Amino acid sequence: MRYSLDFNWLWDGMAALAYGAGTTLALTVSTSVLGIVLSILGAAARRGPYPWLRKLVGLYVEIMRNTPFLVQLFFIFFGLPSLGIRLDPITAAVLAMTLNMAAYTIEVVGAGLDAIPRGQKEAAQALGLRPRLVFFKIILPQAIAIIFPALTSQIIIMMLESAVVSQISVRELAQEADLLQSRTFRSFETYLVATLIYLSMSAALRRLLFAGKRRFLGAGLA
C-alpha cells in the first residue's frame, strides 16, 4: 500500500496546534508550582511531630499513587458533581494534575530532606535560628538542589500526562491534534507533528529548568 504524505493542511492548523501547546504549557507550569508547594508541605508533615498528620499524608500518597490518573480526573470532573461540586474542565484538570503530581513529589522532596545531615539543623538552631527559618533557608534549598533531576523528570512526565485531560474536552495539544485529524483525515501527519511538538516542548522545558537551577541554586549539575 502506497501512502503519500500531505502537509498542506498544516498552515491552517498551526493556530490550533499553537493554542493547544500553549494550554499544555500553562497546565504544566500551574500544576508544577502548586504540586511542588503541596509536596513540600506534605514532606514536612510526614516528618513532623503529629502522628495523625503523618498517617493522613501517607494515606493520600498511597491512594493517589495506586490509582490511575484517568480515574482521578474522572472522579473530580464527573464524580464531584454528585456532591454538588461542579468544576469547569480547566479547573478540574489543574486540580487533578496538581493532586497527582504532589503525591509523587512528596516522596521525592522527602528523600531530599532526609539527605541533609541532621547536624546542620542542630547547628543552625544552636545559633538561635527559628525552626521554620532553618527549614526554608538552610534545609530546603539544599534538598531541592539534590533532588532537582528527579523533580525535573516528574514535571516532564506530568506535562506528557496532561494529554489525558483531553478526555474532559480541555483543548490542550492532544485534543487539538485529535480535532485536526478528524477534519483533515491526515492522522499520520497530524500525530507526527504533535509528537514533534511534544518532543520540542520537553527538551525546551528541561533545558529551561536546568538553566534556572544553575541560576538560582548554583552549578554542579551533571
Image (spheres, rainbow, N blue to C red):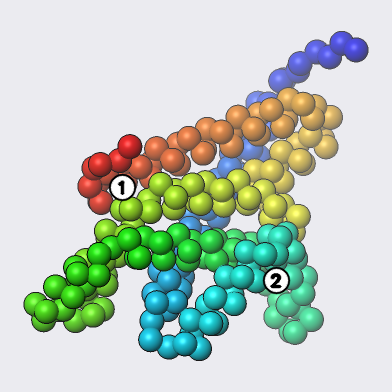
Q: Amino acid at mark 1?
A: Lys
Quadrant (top left/top right/bottom left/bottom right) for the C terminus: top left
Residue 26 left/right relative to 170: left
Residue 112 left/right relative to 61: left
Q: Amino acid at mark 2?
A: Ile
Residue that carries the numbered disc 1 in the rendered image: 213
Q: Extreme left residue here?
A: 127
Q: Quadrant of residue 85?
A: bottom right
Q: Quadrant of residue 27?
A: bottom right
Total number of numbered labels? 2
Badge 2 marks a residue whose secondary structure is helix
Q: Position of residue 209 (x, y in %)?
A: 38, 45
Please tell me which residue lies in front, 191 or 65. Answer: 65
Residue at 71 percent across and 20 percent down: it is 7
Q: Extreme right residue here?
A: 1
Residue at 37 percent across and 51 percent down: it is 148
Q: Is residue 71 shown to the viewer in this render?
A: yes
Residue that carries the numbered disc 2 in the rendered image: 76
Q: Is residue 37 shown to the viewer in this render?
A: no
Residue at 31 percent across and 47 percent down: it is 213
- The vertical placement of 110 against 144, above or below, is below
